[in-house]
Amino acid sequence: MSTSPLNKLTGEYIGAISIMTDITARKGMEKSIMDAMIEKDKDFFFIMGNMVEAVKPLIQKEYVEDFQDKFT
């Protein structure tokens, strides 16, 4: 909502002008975008978590093989 005073040329106040804008559609679009971003982030973290679990045995095996003969 925006309101501005309405004055005569002499500067005398005679009222106000108000403008209201319906932002329902904009708020709905913002919510849709935010929901999509949250869902995308959930998918990303799910995929990354699975990738870490899949790679973990390879990393651990490589680590053991690299240092196996260096410690006695």
Image (cartoon, helix red, strand yellow):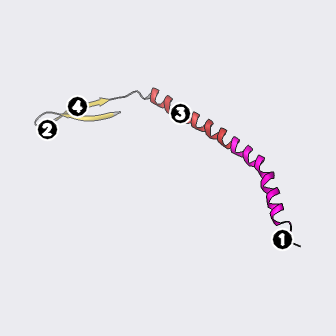
| Residue identifier under label 2 | 11
Q: Earlier in the sequence, mark 3 or mark 4?
A: 4
Identify the element where label 3 is drawn: helix
| Residue identifier under label 3 | 33
* Residue 15 numbered mark, or none: 4
Q: Is residue 6 magenta?
A: no
**Highlighted range, magenta:** 47-72
Q: Earlier in the sequence, mark 2 or mark 3?
A: 2
Judge whether 65 appears above or below 41 on screen: below
| Residue identifier under label 1 | 70
Identify the element where label 1 is drawn: loop
Q: Position of residue 40 (x, y in %)?
A: 61, 37
Q: Earlier in the sequence, mark 4 or mark 1?
A: 4
Q: Position of residue 31 (x, y in %)?
A: 53, 32
Quarter of the image with the C terminus is bottom right
Judge whether 5 appears above or below 65 on screen: above
